[in-house]
Image: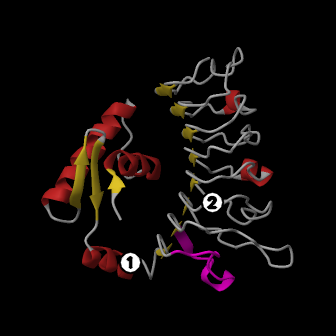
Amino acid sequence: FAIREIDLVHLWIAEGLVEEMNSRQAEYDKGCAIMNRLINNCLLEVPTETENGRCVKMHDLVRDMALHITCGTPRFLVKAGMRLTEPPDIQEWRKDLEKVSLMENWGLQLPYPLEILPPKCPMLTTLLFSGCNIQSIPEGFFKHMHGLKILDLSANPIKNLPDSIANLKNLTALLLRHCRSLEKVPSLSKLKVLKELNLEATSIKEIPCGMENLLKLNYLNLNGIVDLYEIPDRALSKLSCLQDLIVGETVI
């Protein structure tokens, strides 16, 4: 499946695959240089290139090889774009999972009833749920994912996030881009190592509580939020690591 270069590089930065530099632009440029090397060595293809940037994809054989490598240790669970309507069986959420991608499963729901225990994945660092049409997340779903660093829920019609997200103290990237029905985000006061917060094109009406505690935040995207009219005094004044503040079309 084709993915925009800019989105992929941003994920690399969030994953720590690009060395930390003194500016976000420098990190992005480094990521693009890595991208060019992968393309030049035929590990990535360029199926489309538009005014908004190029898209890249993996050849089927390269992807199969990558999945084969990651079926051992470290263990990845990848079921992207497979038209899933339910999440994988609880047996597939193994304790040694490090990365899970269920993105682009349009119609996927998370109907974990109370009698079924939530996934126990203490080693999980990356969870990609973008573009799945998820409308709600059970409150206890993240209960046993304390090691989670990257959570991507972008492009889902979710209205509310479970309060348990506030307990993911190791989270470095919370990606909620184009969650157009999302009106409120739980308090972020405990997410003290969060570096990237993307709220682009959501429907939040106010800045999440606890923003002043995100002392390591370096990327904040508030573009395209129609109902956000004000950023309270001092909400951003302590964010001394902030490098990228994107307001775009949001009228504040």
CB within 8 Å, label 1 to label 2: no
Q: In the current view of this chain or complex, which residue is farthest to the bottom?
A: 91
Residue for badge 2: 147
Q: Residues within 10 Å of mark 1 (few under 14, many from 20)?
A: some
Residue situated in front as seen by the camera: 59 or 105: 105
Q: Position of residue 65 (x, y in %)?
A: 30, 79
137 up-or-down from 83: above or below:
above
Identity, as a three-letter code, of the amino acid under mark 2: Gly
Q: Quadrant of residue 184?
A: top right
Tell me which residue sits at (70%, 58%) in the image: 135
Please state which of residues 153 and 15 is positioned toward the viewer in this rendering.
Answer: 153
Q: Main secondary structure of the magenta part?
A: loop
The answer to whether residue 152 is above or below residue 230 is below
Q: Label 1 sits on what residue type?
A: Leu
Q: Nearer the viewer, mark 1 or mark 2?
A: 1
The residue most toward the top is: 233
As helix, strand or loop, the secondary structure at mark 1 comes to helix
Residue 116 pos. (x, y %): 80, 79
The local crowd at label 2, few if under 14, some if 14 to 19, many if 20 or more residues have their Cα within 10 Å, is some
